[in-house]
Amino acid sequence: VLPPARRAGAGGALRHGAEQVWKSFSQLRAAQEGWRVAPASAEEVWKFFCHLRVAQEGWRVAPGS
């Protein structure tokens, strides 16, 4: 059985990897600041980060994505 990232294909693997990096970064930042990041707020920050990155690269994102 392949890991979830492998089964998802290249795009899924990249997204999975980026999510893992973001979670690690969020946990490190929270530890440095002495606070915890709630999963919902981390998800919102991730969405904002993705939209910001897309804007920087000149890609379009459908509303609600």
Image (cartoon, helix red, strand yellow):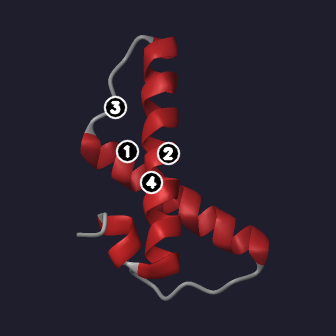
Q: Residue at x 39, y 54 (%)?
A: 44
Left or right for 31, reference 7: right
Which amino acid type corresponds to the residue marked 2 in the rendered image? Trp
Report x, y in % for residue 7: 33, 77
- Residue mark closest to the camera, 3 vs 4: 4
Give the distance between the C-alpha atoms of the residues marked 2 and 1, in whole angstroms: 9 Å
Pointer 1: what residue? 42
Decide: is 42 above or below 57.
above
Which amino acid type corresponds to the residue marked 4 in the rendered image? Glu
Q: Residue furthest right?
A: 57
Pointer 3: what residue? 37
Which amino acid type corresponds to the residue marked 1 in the rendered image? Ala
Contact flag, marks 2 and 1 (Cβ < 8 Å): yes
Query: Is residue 65 visible to the viewer in this orientation of the structure?
Result: no
Instruction: Look at the numbered disc 4 and give the secondary structure of its residue.
Output: helix
Q: Quadrant of the C terminus?
A: bottom left
Pointer 4: what residue? 19
* Residue 57 position by quadrant: bottom right
Label 4: how many residues lie within 10 Å, few (<14), some (14-19) or many (20+)? Answer: some
Q: Earlier in the sequence, mark 2 or mark 1?
A: 2
Left or right for 27, reference 36: right
Give the distance between the C-alpha atoms of the residues marked 4 and 1, in whole angstroms: 10 Å
Contact flag, marks 4 and 1 (Cβ < 8 Å): no
Q: Residue at x 49, y 88 (%)?
A: 62
Contact flag, marks 2 and 4 (Cβ < 8 Å): yes
Q: Earlier in the sequence, mark 3 or mark 2?
A: 2
Pointer 2: what residue? 22
Contact flag, marks 1 and 3 (Cβ < 8 Å): yes
* Residue 56 position by quadrant: bottom right
Instruction: Look at the numbered disc 3 and give the secondary structure of its residue.
Output: loop
